[in-house]
Every structure is written in C-alpha cells, then in structure tokens.
C-alpha cells in the first residue's frame, strides 16, 4: 500500500472513529433523555393514578355525605309530618272543645230560661193561691163589695 492510500485510509479511520464516537455520544445522550422521559412518564402515570384514587375516594365520601343528608332529610320530613299530624289533632280537639263549650253554654242558657219559667210559673201559682185564700176569708167579700162602685 502506498503512502497516499494509507493516508486516505488513516483519515477515513479517524473520520469513522469520530463518527462512531459521535454516534455513541448521541446514543448515550438519547438513551439518557429517553430514560428521563420514561421516568417522567412513570412519575406522571403514578401521580395520575394517585389523583384518580383520591378523586374516587372523594367521590365516595361525597356520595356518603349525600346519602347521609338524604337520610337526615327523610327523618326531618317524617318528624315534620308527625308534628303536622299532632298539630292537626290538637286543632281538631280544640275545635271539639269549642263546640262542646258552645253546647254547654247553650244548655246552661236553656237551663236558666227553664228555671226562670219555673220561677215565673211558681210566682203565678203563689199569686193565684193567695187570691184564692183571700177570697176564702169571710171579710174579703165585704171588702169586695165595699170597693165596688
């Protein structure tokens, strides 16, 4: 081999070694970047999974709170219904008591009127008896004749 060919071959070898070293550097740096990207993707995946689990737990807690609220609302509605029924029952009782009081008052009024009638008739009867007794006395006839014109 001649000297120029060796020179050319030596330059080609150097150029190939530089290219090889460049490719090796590129491969190593690209591998490093790929490893970093893989690690970042893994971290982001894990974070996304953790967030999803957290969101599911929060959703479950929200559902449980909503169920509790619904249950409390049902219980409160039931208590309100019972209170409404009790109030209605008390209103009915008060209305009945008012009607009974009106009846008693009316009965008392009728009884008073009956007593007044009985007293009136008793007074009339006493007056008639007194007249009969007065007519039955011997001096009463003379008084009647004396008063007659």
Image: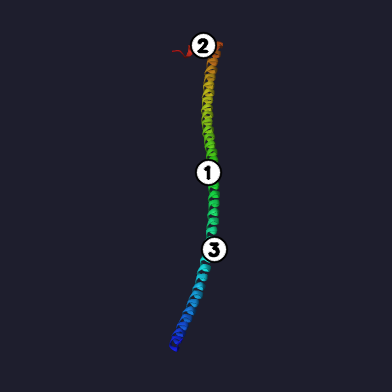
User: Which colour scheme appears in the figure?
Assistant: rainbow
Which residue is identified by label 1? 77
Q: Which residue is mark 2?
A: 142
Looking at the image, is 100 positioned above or below residue 59? above
- Crowd around label 1: few <14 · some 14–19 · many ≥20 (10 Å): few
- x and y percentages locating residue 83 in the rendered image: 54, 41
Q: Are marks 3 and 2 in contact (CB under 8 Å)?
A: no
Q: Which of the two marks, 2 or 1, is nearer to us in this view?
A: 1
Real-space CA distance between mark 3 and mark 1, rounded to the nearest whole angstrom: 46 Å
Cα distance between the residues tagged 2 and 1: 94 Å
Where does the image place residue 49, in percent across and percent down from the top left? 53, 60
The structure residue drawn at horizontal position 53% and vertical position 56%, both measured from the top left corner, is 56
Q: Secondary structure at mark 2?
A: helix
Task: For the C terminus, give its image quadrant.
Answer: top left
Number of other residues with Cα within 10 Å of mark 3, as a class: few under 14, some 14 to 19, many 20 or more: few
Relative side of 130 to 12, left or right: right
Q: Nearer the viewer, residue 79 or 101?
A: 79
Q: Which mark is residue 46?
A: 3
Which residue is at the far bottom? 3
- Asked which quadrant contains residue 115, the reply is top right
Helix, strand or loop at label 3? It is helix
Q: Which one is in front, 80 or 75?
A: 75
At 55% across and 16% down in the image, what residue appears?
130
Height in image: 71 above or below 93?
below
Q: Is the residue 117 above or below the residue 88 in the image?
A: above
From the top left corner, tell me how far across and down residue 123 is, in percent: 53, 20
């Amino acid at each position: 081999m001649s000297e120029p060919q060796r020179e050319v071959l030596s330059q080609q070898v150097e150029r190939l070694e530089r290219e090889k070293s460049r490719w090796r550097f590129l491969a190593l740096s690209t591998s490093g970047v790929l490893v970093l990207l893989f690690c970042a993707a893994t971290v982001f995946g894990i974070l996304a999974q953790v967030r999803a689990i957290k969101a599911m737990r929060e959703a479950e807690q929200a559902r449980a709170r909503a169920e509790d609220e619904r249950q409390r609302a049902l219980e409160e509605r039931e208590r309100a219904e019972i209170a409404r029924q009790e109030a209605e029952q008390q209103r009915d009782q008060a209305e009945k008591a008012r009607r009974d009081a009106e009846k008693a008052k009316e009965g008392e009024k009728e009884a008073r009127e009956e007593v007044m009638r009985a007293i009136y008739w008793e007074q009339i009867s006493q007056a008639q008896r007194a007249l009969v007794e007065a007519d039955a006395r011997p001096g009463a006839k003379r008084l009647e004749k004396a008063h007659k014109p």
